[in-house]
Image: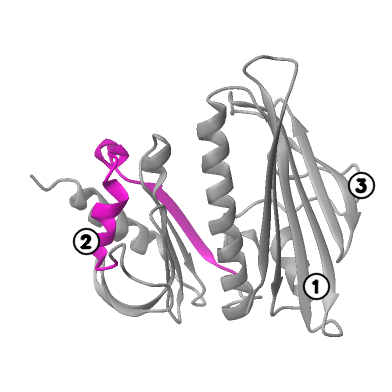
C-alpha cells in the first residue's frame, strides 16, 4: 500500500535553450528503511537496471561517473555528475533519496528528487523523464513488496525502427492482450512469446507493467518521445537464464511490427 505526491518544477538557466529541472516524488511503502536503502544502492537490477554500487562514503564514486555527495545509511543518499557522459542533451544530473521510518520502522517514507540541466529538446526530455520516474518508482515498490531482497536476472532491449510509430505501444498492448482499457490489478493471460498468467500492476498510455510469481516484465512506450518501444525483464527465479527469455521476447516484439 502506498501514498504518493509529486512536484515538478523548472527554472531558466543562462543559456536560452537550457533549463534546470526538478522532478520530486514522495511515497510510503510496506518495506523497512533498510530494505529501501539496499534496493537503491545494491539492488537496482530488481526494478531499474544493474549498476555498480556506489562507494559508501561522501566523495566516493557513484554510477555513470557521478560522485556521492550525501551518504547516511539508511536515511540519505545523493549522487551528482556534471557533463553527463554519452548524453548530449544533459549537462548536470543529480539523484537524491531521503528515507524515513514509519510505523516504528516497519514501513518507510521515501522522497526522491531528480534534478539537473537539459540543454536540448527540453519539453520532450522533461516529459519523458517525469513519466519514466513514476513508472520506475512504481516498479521499485513492486520489487520491495513482492521480491526483495532477491537478486534479479536482468535483460533489456528495444523494438525495431517501426516501434517508434505514434501507436506503437497500443499495438504491443493489443498483441499482449493488455489493452488500454485494462485496469491495474486485473489478472490476465498474457500472449507474449508464450502464454502466461500475470497481474497487470501498471497500465497507462505510456507503460505496461506485468507481475508474476517469477518476476516483472516492463514495457516502455518510448515511442511517445521519438524512440523505439523498450522491454525489460526482471527474473527472480534462482539460477534463471534470462538470455533465453530475452531472445524469445525480442523475436516476439519484432514480430508485432512485421505484420502487414
User: Quick check: 19 left or right of 132?
Assistant: right
Q: Is residue 64 magenta?
A: no
User: Quick check: 45 left or right of 203?
Assistant: right
Where residue 91 sits in the image (x, y, percent)? 69, 26
Crowd class of label 1 (few under 14; some 14 to 19; many from 20; radius 10 Å): many
Where residue 163 sits in the image (x, y, percent)? 28, 42
Marked residue nearer the N-terminal end (1 or 2): 1
Where residue 69 sits in the image (x, y, percent)? 88, 44
Q: Which residue, given by chain and number where applicable, does mark 1 sit on?
A: 33
Instruction: Give how far apart the Cα atoms at labels 1 and 3 are.
Output: 20 Å
Q: Is residue 225 above or below residue 193?
A: above
Crowd class of label 3 (few under 14; some 14 to 19; many from 20; radius 10 Å): some
Give me the residue at 39% from left, 59% from top: 243
Where residue 116 sits in the image (x, y, percent)? 72, 34
Give me the residue at 24% from left, 38% from top: 162
Local SS, label 1 = helix
Q: Is residue 152 magenta?
A: yes
Give me the residue at 57% from left, 62% from top: 47
The nearer-to-camera label among 2 and 3 is: 2
Q: Of residues 34 and 220, which is closer to you in this image?
A: 220
Local SS, label 3 = loop
Q: Which stretch did the figure color magenta? A: 151-178
Q: Is residue 83 above or below residue 14?
A: below
Q: Which residue, given by chain and number where applicable, does mark 3 sit on?
A: 58
Q: Which residue, given by chain and number where applicable, does mark 2 sit on?
A: 175
Amino acid at each position: 500500500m502506498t501514498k504518493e505526491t509529486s512536484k515538478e518544477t523548472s527554472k531558466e538557466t543562462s543559456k536560452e535553450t537550457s533549463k534546470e529541472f526538478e522532478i520530486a516524488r514522495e511515497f510510503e511503502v510496506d518495506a523497512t528503511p533498510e530494505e529501501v536503502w539496499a534496493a537503491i544502492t545494491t539492488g537496482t537490477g530488481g526494478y531499474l537496471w544493474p549498476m555498480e554500487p556506489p562507494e559508501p562514503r561522501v566523495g566516493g564514486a557513484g554510477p555513470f561517473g557521478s560522485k556521492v555527495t550525501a551518504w547516511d545509511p539508511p536515511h540519505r543518499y545523493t549522487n551528482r555528475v556534471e557533463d553527463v557522459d554519452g548524453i548530449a542533451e544533459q549537462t548536470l544530473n543529480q539523484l537524491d533519496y531521503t528515507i524515513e521510518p514509519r510505523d516504528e520502522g516497519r514501513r518507510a517514507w521515501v522522497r526522491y528528487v531528480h534534478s539537473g540541466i537539459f540543454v536540448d529538446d527540453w519539453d520532450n526530455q522533461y516529459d519523458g523523464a517525469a513519466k519514466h520516474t513514476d513508472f520506475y518508482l512504481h516498479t521499485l515498490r513492486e520489487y520491495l513488496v513482492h521480491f526483495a531482497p532477491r537478486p534479479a536476472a536482468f535483460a533489456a532491449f528495444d523494438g525495431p525502427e517501426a516501434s517508434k510509430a505514434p501507436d506503437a505501444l497500443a499495438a504491443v498492448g493489443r498483441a499482449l492482450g493488455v489493452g488500454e482499457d485494462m485496469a491495474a490489478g486485473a489478472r490476465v493471460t498474457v500472449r507474449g512469446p508464450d502464454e502466461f498468467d500475470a497481474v497487470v500492476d501498471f497500465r497507462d498510455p505510456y507503460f505496461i507493467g506485468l507481475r508474476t510469481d517469477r518476476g516483472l516484465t516492463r514495457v516502455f512506450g518510448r515511442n511517445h518521445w521519438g524512440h523505439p518501444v523498450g522491454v525489460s525483464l526482471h527474473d527472480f527465479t534462482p539460477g534463471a537464464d534470462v538470455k533465453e527469455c530475452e531472445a524469445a521476447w525480442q523475436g516476439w516484439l519484432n514480430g508485432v511490427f512485421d505484420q502487414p
